Amino acid sequence: MNNIKLSLANLTKSIDAIALPAKRLSAAKSFTPLNEHISQIMSFNFIDNDYENKDIIFNKIAYTSLAQYTLENTNLIEDEAPLVDNLNWDLFDEVRAVFKNEVKKRWQKFIDTEIGQEAFVFVVDCFENWLVYKQLHPNSTKNPWIKTNEILQENGFMYFLSDNLSDIEKYNSQIPKHERIEDMLTPYSSKLMMIASNSKKNEIKPLNNIEKMQAIVLQYLKSQHTKNKKYVTSKTLSKVLLAEMYQSFEKDWNQKFNPQRKFTHLSDVKIKNIVLLPLKRLGLIGTSNSGLFYIDNLDDIEEAKHFLTESQKRIQKTLSAYEHKARLMGY
Amino acid sequence: MDIQQTFPDDPIVLNIELGAGCGDFGKKFYFPCYLTELQKPTCEKSFIDHICDAHCLPWTKDRFITIIACNPFGYGFNTEESTTKLMDEISRVIITAGEFLVISSSTNRWGSIRVINREITKYQIKNPHLKISVTQKINTNADIIATFPNYQFYQSDQKTTATPNELTVIKISK
C-alpha cells in the first residue's frame, strides 16, 4: 500500500545510509548497480515507445530523456497510481539540503576539484529523481534510483555519466596507460561513459549499449515469430547481437571496430541478466525448452508461464531435498 | 549591461521558444516565433533559428511578448539558484505584461506549477521592482491535447514521448 507518510525524519534516515558508505569496494563494482539502474529506466521506454523505427544512440541526452520519461510514467510498471498530490516540494527542498550537506561533509575536498564538482551535480540529480519517485510511490522497490544510491552507499564512490570525450580524456589521463578509452571499447559500447571516483582513484568505463541490444533482440525475435516457428537459441541470439553491434559501433563512433581486436565478449549469463531478463519482466519475450521467443499472442504467454511454473517446481524439489538432508544431519 | 544583437533580427517575430529541440511547437501555435536550443539538434529536420543558452539570450531587452518552454528539464525552477538564473534573463527580454508559458508534467521538478509557484514567490521577494503573477491554465493531459491538437511532445532526445499535463502562465510586469 502506498500509504506511508513521508517526513524529514524518516527520509533523513535513508540519507544517513546513503551518505555513509558501509564499505569501500572496487570501482568496477559500481558499474553493476549503474547498469541495473539504466536497464530499469529503459524498461519504461520499451513498454510504451516504438523501438523499431528508432535510431538508438545511447548518449547523455538519451539518458536524461529516459529519466524524464520514467518520472512521467511510473504507472507503466507500478501497480498503484502515483501519489502526485503527495509531492511535497517544501519537504523535497529540506531533504535535498540535508543530503547535499551530508555528501559535502564526506567529500568536500573532492567536490572542490573539477571532476568532483561534476560528480556532485550528477549524484544530487540522481538523488532528486529518487526523491520524486519516492514521494510518488513511497513503498516501491522498483524505483530505478535505488540503484544509484547504492553506488554511494555500498561502494563509497562518487560518479557521473558523460559523453563529452574531451572531458573523459582529461580524466582518463589520471589512470594507467593500459586502460586508455579506445582499448576499453567493445562492439557493445555506448557513447556514454561512467566515471567513478573514490577521490583518490578515478575509474572510467564505457557503458554497454543495453537499449540498442534490447531493441535488436526484440526485432530479431519478432522477425523469427512466424506461423511455423518462433524459437531462437541463446547461442544464435548472441551471434546476431554481436554482428549487429559491430554495425552499431561503426555508426556511433564513425569508425569500424576491428574484428581482429581482442575484447571481452559478453557472456551468455551477462546477456541474460542485462538484456533478456528486463525484457522478460516486461512481458515482451518468453523462454521455453526450445529457446527464446517473442510474445505475440495468448498462446505465447501460456507457454512462457508454463515453462516458469515447471522451473519453479524443479527448484522446489531441490529445496525440499536440501531441507530433508539438513534434517538427516540433525539440524 | 544589455546584450547587443549581432545577427539580422526580424522585428515582426515577438515570440520565442526555449530549448525547442527538434520540435516546432512555437512555430505551429505561436507563429511567428523564434526557436532556440542550447546545442545543435541531431535530428534530420530541425526548425531551430538560434543556438543559444536560455540563460543568456542574444537579444536586447524588452524584445518578446511570449516566451515558451516545453518540458524543461535541466533548467528552470528546480532550485532558487536555477530559478534566479532563468527568471533574470526572462525578465530582461520580455516586454512589460509579457507572458512566459511553461508546459510541463506535474512530476517535473523543473517546471510543474507547484514548483513554479513556490520559487516565483521567493524570486518576487528578491525582485520587488517586478510584478509577477502565476496562473495555471491547464491541468490535464487531455486538455493539453485538446488545446494543442495533432502535436506530439517529446523529451529532450526528441524520440521519447512526453505527456505534459500542465500549462502555467507567468505574467511579468516591469
Image (cartoon, helix red, strand yellow):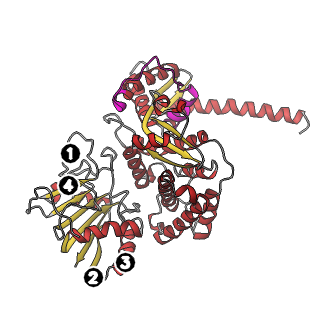
Cβ atoms at labels 3 and 2 below 8 Å apart: no
Of residue A310 and residue A74, the one placed in the foreground of this image is A74
- Residue type at tag 1: Ser
Residues drawn in magenta: A250-279
- Where B25 falls versus B125 (above or below)? above
Q: Earlier in the sequence, mark 4 or mark 1?
A: 4
Q: Are marks 3 and 2 on the same chain?
A: yes
- Residue type at tag 4: Leu
Q: Position of residue B101 (x, y in %)?
A: 25, 66
Q: Chain of mark 3?
A: B
Q: Position of residue A276 (x, y in %)?
A: 51, 32
Q: Earlier in the sequence, mark 3 or mark 2?
A: 3
Quadrant including the C terminus of chain B: bottom left
Of residue B85 and residue B143, the one placed in the foreground of this image is B85
For the residues carrying marks 1 and 2, which lies nearer the camera in this image? 2
Q: Which mark is residue B121?
A: 3
Q: Chain of mark 2?
A: B
Q: Are marks 1 and 2 on the same chain?
A: yes
